Amino acid sequence: MASYDVRSPRADEFINHEEIMDTLAYAEAHKDDVELARSILQKARANLAPAHDHGTTLTHREASVLLACDDDAVNAEIRQLARDIKQAYYGNRVVLFAPLYLSNWCVNGCLYCPYHATNREIPRRKLTQEEIRAEVIALQDMGHKRLAVEAGEDPCHNPLDYILESLQTIYATKHENGAIRRANVNIAATTEDAYRQLKAAEIGTYILFQETYHRERYEALHPTGPKADYAWHTEAHDRAMAAGIDDVGLGVLFGLEGYAYEFAGLLMHAEHLEAVFGVGPHTISVPRVKPASDIDPDAFEGGIPDEMFEKVIALIRIAVPYTGMIISTRESADLRARALKLGVSQISGGSRTSVGGYTDEQRPRDTEQFDVSDTRTLDEVVGWLMDEGHIPSFCTACYRAGRTGDRFMEFCKSGQISSFCAPNALITLAEYLADYASPATAASGWQTIERELALLPEGRRDACAAYIARVRSGERDFRF
């Protein structure tokens, strides 16, 4: 039987079932120990003053105790601490992106995804390079600068060469003042050599969702296809980082297995990357199972209610304070608003989860990967964010300036990242307002920029104001 070893290269050892079960038993036994819960929260409060050594990170076991605790006062403290830690690391900035689906051809048999190979209800489609260019122009015309590139796993229809050529097309496409400055990639687990090629293609973050960390459940949900290999999939981030990809993103699909199990496994994975590579996950995503063609969420027994889902988000922020947290348009506007206050720092806007969906006048449904709950336009999302007190950011400066991997973490964990992020967020918001915003959003946005400029340190404030003035006169692409 495998034993727990956070530094092991083997999936069954760094995501160890017995360790998770022991953790859940410990959390259940101590869930009413309010004194213990408060001591754990006190330990986490050290993250309100970010430090280089980051020695106060909670363990998966400590965080699991907080998750199990149902004391109302403790839960209120958890929510407040999550808000405060997010403010300490990310301020009120919210990064915006959109998914771009290249192909829904897939050879896997995943029981929770409509792309599974045996689904005969969904039309199969793969974008040509000219179609990709049209999609990118449509996204640029909305105002997007950052994409998450998605494709099903199919060696014939979606080989690596197709993904690499598509990335070239995405980066090369320029329309008016538009440009995609960062393309993150969410494709199937692959080889170390393939990751080197993706690195050479200048991807941003390599994102791969675990779906579920429960191996037995994972194998039942993946009866056929290459994704059925649990170890190959779970160890993919190690191969990516060994190949030189600095930034990787984790995530589980909440609802497939018990949320407490997935929460512990997710934190163990973050601990593993930190222990082995000195760099934890650049992002953590928190999708939930949603309706889609051939998929009924009620068929899965691990559903997580909104209140507990929000607590999970808050505790991820507390336990992994440096990570960017992502929530997509799977969730409603109301839930996304609450999640932003509890720790989420990146959201999608104006998303279409269908292949070729951005060039269709009407939102297509038949090739969607999941039903979109938040169907607002990007402009509506930008205006809403400002109404909620956030700064919408289209910034990609760290990636383009080489502040990735351990270099990004050095700035983030020490709290220095805000000296870059705050002015860069305002500069990219100014670009959006000048080029794409509706009159109402533009009026609100320029007021937001004036207010936030006043909060910057004097040296940065003057330089940022000068860049914004140049943006208003027609120049583009400034960054700190």
Image (spheres, helix red, strand yellow):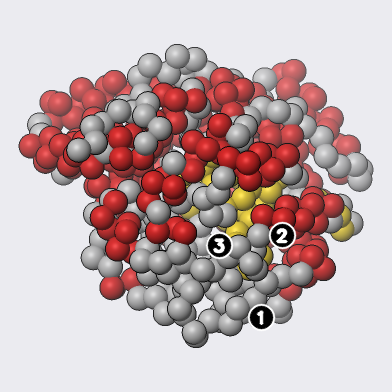
Which quadrant, please, contains the C terminus? Answer: top right
Q: Residue at x 49, y 25 (%)?
A: 277
Q: Residue at x 27, y 22 (%)?
A: 42
Relative to residue 466, is residue 316 drawn left or right?
left
User: Is disc 3 placed on a helix, strand or loop?
Assistant: loop
User: Rounded to the nearest whole Å, what is the CA distance between mark 3 and mark 1?
Assistant: 27 Å
In the figure, 171 relative to 101: above or below?
above
Residue holding disc 2: 162
Pointer 3 or 1: first along the chain: 3
CB under 8 Å between discs 2 and 1: no
How many labels, in total? Answer: 3
Pointer 2 or 3: first along the chain: 3
Relative to residue 81, is residue 427 drawn left or right?
right
Residue type at mark 3 is: Glu
Relative to residue 437, is residue 31 drawn left or right?
left
Relative to residue 454, is residue 131 drawn left or right?
right
Using the image, tell me which numbered label, if any, was put on residue 153. 3
User: Rounded to the nearest whole Å, what is the CA distance between mark 2 and mark 3?
Assistant: 12 Å
Instruction: List x then y, in percent, for residue 207.
Output: 54, 47
Residue type at mark 2 is: Tyr
Q: Residue at x 74, y 34 (%)?
A: 400
Residue holding disc 1: 362
Q: Residue at x 44, y 41 (%)?
A: 235
